[in-house]
Image (cartoon, grey):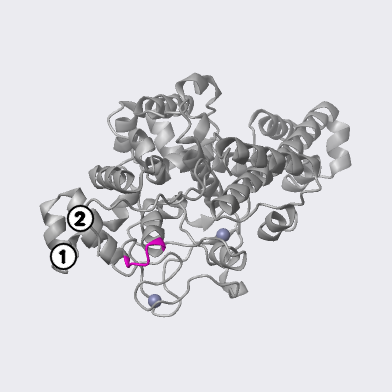
Amino acid sequence: MFDICTQLYNLKPIGLNTGLVESQTSYLARLSETHSVSVGTLIGKVIAPVLGKGYLLESSSNGGSRFYDVGAELNGFGILSQDIVRVLSQLTGCNTLKSLTLLPLREILTNGGTLRQTKAWCPLCLEEWKNGKLDIYEPLLWSVKAVSICGNHGISLKTQCPMCKKEIPFLSRKSRNGFCSYCGCWLGTTDLKINEEINFQQTSLEYFVANNMKILLEMKDNPTFSPSAEDVYVFLSTIIDNAGGRIAFSRKFGIPLTTARYWYEGRHIPYLKTLLEICYKVCIDINELSKENQTKFGSISRDNVYALPGKQNKTVFKKGSYDWSRVEKILQDIISNEIIPFPSVCEVARYIQCDKKLLYRHFPNLCKEISKKHSSFIHKQKMKRIDEGCQRIKETTKILNDSGVYPSRRKIESLLPSNIQLREKAYQKAWKESLDNLSLNNPSE
Ligand SMILES: [Zn+2]
Ligand SMILES: [Zn+2]
């Protein structure tokens, strides 16, 4: 069917330079579909001969499955993913395929624990793309093991076919994006059983991990951003020092002492998930993780701080009256520790079971300080929400355009939650900028 030298169609990857960039296995599936052949045919007849690996040739043409067994690796940062990038680039003429893998982040990743071995997907995202008549693809983000939810929909990613209940490999001869490769069932749906679904809060660890990973995937192709193992070690050793040494760190963060020592000595890099959990606890976004930010790395663990007022609320009573010196200490602790979410005076009063007015009367300055910090926290949250909204507009514009659909205002709004309306100035600006970017990058279109 194909000659070895046949050039494949120069298919454009979806979502380049966004956190929702397509994965290499997804690209391979779309490439097959574009040529109206199965993934098995494409791999066996076109890719395998160019790849030139004996085992693959034999295995693939003789019906073996070794190559498919390691399909997940195509999205990773090892030799196989590198080889496939090379071969596909050669065959398609597309030179951005490295971005569909974790290769650009290899320095800060560990061999185990980074990639999922079978597919995960958000049924709501798939359904929205289908209804919007967009190309169905699978973001690289979904193949990262640490990511357990869809940050856009706040639901957990699914890992089992709703029909045959099987886990689906990243690569099989009959792979199709958005479909089960065993029974052919469509994996998108809007019909989620509400009671089965946990809606993840924006302040949850799951949300933080999904969002930070998305940031990392977006930044990874930026030439000025190249996180190194050294950055990770500097970050960890600073956190360990700030926590009061390895023993204190180990207790505070629930990390085995030996592991903490290896990190401190720069001998091991943590699993991506663990690294992100530590970032969450110290309120550092992963893109800030560079040596230059060393002074910024705080030591306060989120869990710690949360526990603070609750644990002490019993001791503030002293024979019918308040132990005001303890209350004062609690207020000072709240102010000096950057609690997230930073409480209002009203919430603090509730924590320590004291009337708000009474609290204000005894500690007017501390209360004002807390109130100020709370307002600033609320403001920051709002800015963060707007930033994330802009980010989603940018991604959606790109994905629509990559699918050959004009990213009109109505189209974008139909794909985003109702609280993102383009009549809002910041959102409109983000949309216009994204449109300008598209025309800059594709002057011919
Ligand atoms: Zn989703
Ligand atoms: Zn199935």
Residue extent of the magenta highlight: 34-38
**Assess mark 1: CB under 8 A from ligand 2?**
no
How many residues crowd around disc 2 within 10 Å: few (fewer than 14), some, or many (20 or more)?
many
Q: Is residue 141 visible?
A: yes
Measured in 3D between alpha carbons, the distance from the residue under mark 1 to the one under mark 2, in whole angstroms, is: 9 Å
Measured along the vertical axis of the image, is residue 181 above or below residue 428? below
Tell me the residue that label 2 is attached to. 48
Amino acid at the residue labelled 1: Ser
Q: Quadrant of residue 381?
A: top right
Label whose residue precedes the other's in the sequence (1 or 2): 2
Q: Disc 2 marks which amino acid?
A: Ala
**Circle 1 residues within 10 Å: few <14, some 14–19, many ≥20:** some
Q: Would residue 415 be found to the left or right of residue 221 on screen?
A: right
Instruction: Write down the quadrant of residue 445 in the picture.
Output: top right
Image point 63% across, 54% down: which residue? Answer: 201
Residue 98: x %, y % from top left:
37, 41
Quadrant including the N terminus: bottom left
Position of residue 218 in the picture relative to residue 327 (left or right): left
On residue 61, which mark appears? 1
Q: Who's the residue at 46% across and 58% down the image? A: 138
Q: Quadrant of residue 414?
A: bottom right
Local SS, label 1: helix
Image coordinates of residue 246 in percent, x first then y, are 38, 30
Report if the CB atoms under discs 1 and 2 are less than 8 Å apart: yes
